[in-house]
Image: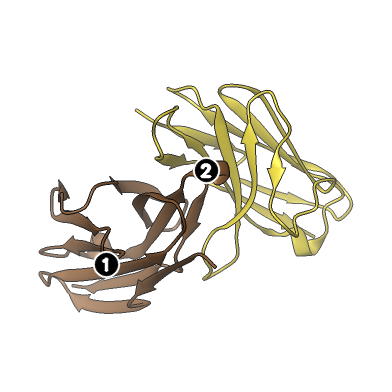
Chain colours: A yellow, B brown
Amino acid sequence: GAVVSQHPSWVICKSGTSVKIECRSLDFQATTMFWYRQFPKQSLMLMATSNEGSKATYEQGVEKDKFLINHASLTLSTLTVTSAHPEDSSFYICSARGGPGTDTQYFGPGTRLTVL
Amino acid sequence: EDKVVQSPLSLVVHEGDTVTLNCSYEVTNFRSLLWYKQEKKAPTFLFMLTSSGIEKKSGRLSSILDKKELFSILNITATQTGDSAIYLCAVVRGGSTLGRLYFGRGTQLTVWP
């Protein structure tokens, strides 16, 4: 159990386009999902916390207009990188809390974004 | 300022060796500590620890938490090349940031055949 999927697993796009990444909890309901970014040889950097049915909470320094997060259902959260630029190229990972009362987060397999 | 410090940052051993990875923390309103293994992709969950002195075990891996001294260790016995990965320690705080993971930098473990 506790499987989280992400789609797509990798994407290449041109500068200026928008890219949407989906994160789904497959076998449990996730009231809270988290979006991370990871640069090579660095640890995960939390971008935002997404609660179902409410606005996401962004970490300091993360542009909410650039990284749009929607958590419309208990099993799906999306991250849209708007007007992507080469510096947005990174590994984006989502995670989902395994339900109320548990602190365990289960991670998706990640999405490698390359902006040309 | 909250801190999660892992040591060593990297470790190279031979198959069959036993390793101990350390994680110390200074976090207000501590709630739990989690260990993850990250290979090429995203982290996979290993253990969640909330109580002091109770060892969690899964095969060759085990972990324990000391809430008085504010640290945890992850032990791997009889290491195999498949154990090569980055091991991440993360702490969860209670309160308004409930659920958020505060990560250490990780320990890069390399197991040679």
SS at badge 1: loop
SS at badge 2: helix
Residue B45: x and y in percent read 35, 46
Parent chain of label 2: B
| In this picture, residue A75 sits left or right of residue B9 | right
Q: Which residue is painted at 86% across and 56% down in the image?
A: A15
User: Would you call the spot at circle 1 few (<14 residues within 10 Å), some (14-19), or many (20 or more)?
Assistant: few
Q: Is residue A74 above or below residue B100?
A: above
Image quadrant where residue B70 sits: bottom left
According to the picture, the residue beneath numbered tag 2 turns out to be: B95
According to the picture, the residue beneath numbered tag 1 turns out to be: B69
Image quadrant where residue B10 sits: bottom left
Residue B81: x and y in percent read 23, 65
Residue B5: x and y in percent read 41, 71
User: Quick check: do tags 1 and 2 share a chain?
Assistant: yes
Q: In front: B10, or A11?
A: B10
Q: Which residue is painted at 51% across and 27% down in the image?
A: A30
| In this picture, residue B12 sits left or right of residue B100 | left
Q: Is residue A91 above or below residue B58?
A: below
Q: Quadrant of the N terminus of chain A?
A: top left
Parent chain of label 1: B
Q: How many marks?
A: 2
